[in-house]
Amino acid sequence: MIPSVLPTYNRAPLEFVKGEGSWLFEADGRRFLDLGSGIAVNALGHANPKLVEVLSAQAQNLWHVSNLYKIPQQEKLADLLVEHSFADTVFFTNSGTEACELAVKMARKYFYDKGQPERVEIITFDGSFHGRSSAGIAAAGTEKMVKGFGPLLPGFVHLTFGDMDGLTSAISDQTAAVLIEPIQGEGGIRPLPDAELKALRQICDAAGILLILDEVQCGVGRTGKFFAHEWAGVTPDIMMVAKGIGGGFPLGAVLATEEAASGMTAGTHGSTYGGNPLGCAVGCAVVEEVMAPGFLAEVNRRAGLFQQKLEGLVAAHPDVFEELRGTGLMLGLKCKALNMDVVQAGYDNEVITVPAADNVIRLLPPLTVSDDEICEAIARLDKAATQVASA
Ligand SMILES: *Cc1c(COP(=O)(O)O)cnc(C)c1O
């Protein structure tokens, strides 16, 4: 008999009842060190006191009014994002995949309004992940995601990740944009080298097309910059954000330049829940915390410590691990053993990691993880690796 919850997930037999900082608790008191953060979502840890306070205060006052009216929390969050990024304007969504929908629509509308309605194609890359909506699965094109779901949203061209030569020849007079993750998350923590992101920007400029970055997983301080593309010193025209920005509250956004957003006039897009007072109040608190003086410097310092210790872990378990990948606290261990066996051994040793493609386990701790917790993480991962090696 089908379970009451549609069985689209293979769930681990873990059931958490409480979270605090970098820790998750089961009802029997078992305490897990969380290196997954609900897939890079709980950027400020579980039950962060500041976020609890802001959410509770907003919940006492006003939850939802719809976008028929002005929402001051939304304006404040948009102002903050504009202040701290390349963007001139922001649209709020409830998830990453909704941000993908708008990013694609925005790019196409831009060229439509410019008198180039034939420019509808979006170039994307293998191993990418842009969510599970129709645009998201068509963009990624992965067989596992698209097979059986009928005709896909047309207009996506798929290239090998980082294939710059292929890119130049794939661009035609039907191309609207290139869509890429600066660091692939689901694809196995595969970073696009800074030089390639720079080259990508130049190629887009030369061809007169838009650059869309998907920073749903790598954004909001995860790599040690507010947004990952800042490391390369280039900016996109349109950017998708979600996951970390809500700190656990469902919140996403599309950030854009005034030029790229110029087609999105009144009535061209909308969302009932998008940008609601609850989500935006929390989003403001997250952005204020991440952009507070010293916060990102501290993320980078901790990331340096974690990376150094993880290199030691890889060296100590050459049969289990192949290499460490990633930037800041967006890290992956490419495994020689089966990644799911390592994740399972982590559960046995009360440390949470997240599997990804390419036989990788992801390490995405809260950005607030402490030095002691990093040492504890290494100790538990070491036990897990020893268990895998001796199995
Ligand atoms: C998670 C993710 C998405 C989809 O976000 P949802 O909130 O699950 O819709 C899109 N792009 C990237 C890079 C992601 O990691």
Image (tube, rainbow, N blue to C red):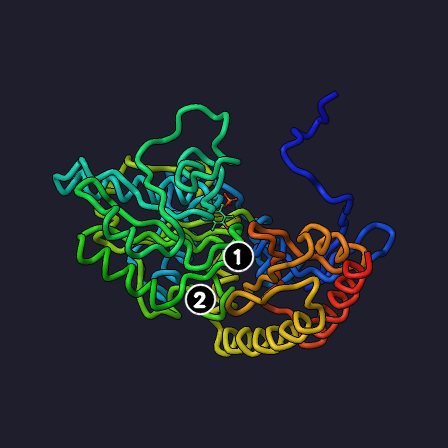
**First in residue order: circle 2 vs circle 1:** 2
Label 2, label 1: how far apart the Cα atoms are: 11 Å
Instruction: Report the amino acid beneath label 1.
Output: Gly
Q: Residue 122 occupies which quadrant of the picture?
A: top left
In the rendered image, the quadrant that contains the C terminus is bottom right
Residue 357 sits above or below residue 307 on the image: above
Numbered circle sitting on residue 244:
1
Indicate the position of residue 100 as horizontal and vertical percent values.
40, 43
Task: Identify the residue shown where x is 53% and y is 44%.
Answer: 63
- The kind of secondary structure element at disc 2 is loop
Residue 44 sits above or below residue 111 on the image: below
Indicate the position of residue 69 as horizontal and vertical percent values.
38, 41
Residue 72 appears in the rendering: no
Whether residue 277 sits left or right of residue 303 in the image: it is left
Q: Are marks 2 and 1 in contact (CB under 8 Å)?
A: no
* Residue placed under numbered mark 2 in the picture: 226
- The kind of secondary structure element at disc 1 is helix
Task: Identify the residue shown where x is 34% and y is 54%.
Answer: 163
Q: Report the residue that reaches farthest toward the left.
A: 115
Residue 342 appears in the rendering: yes
Task: Identify the residue shown where x is 47% and y is 55%.
Answer: 184
Indicate the position of residue 223 as horizontal and vertical percent values.
49, 67
Residue 249 sits above or below residue 20 on the image: above
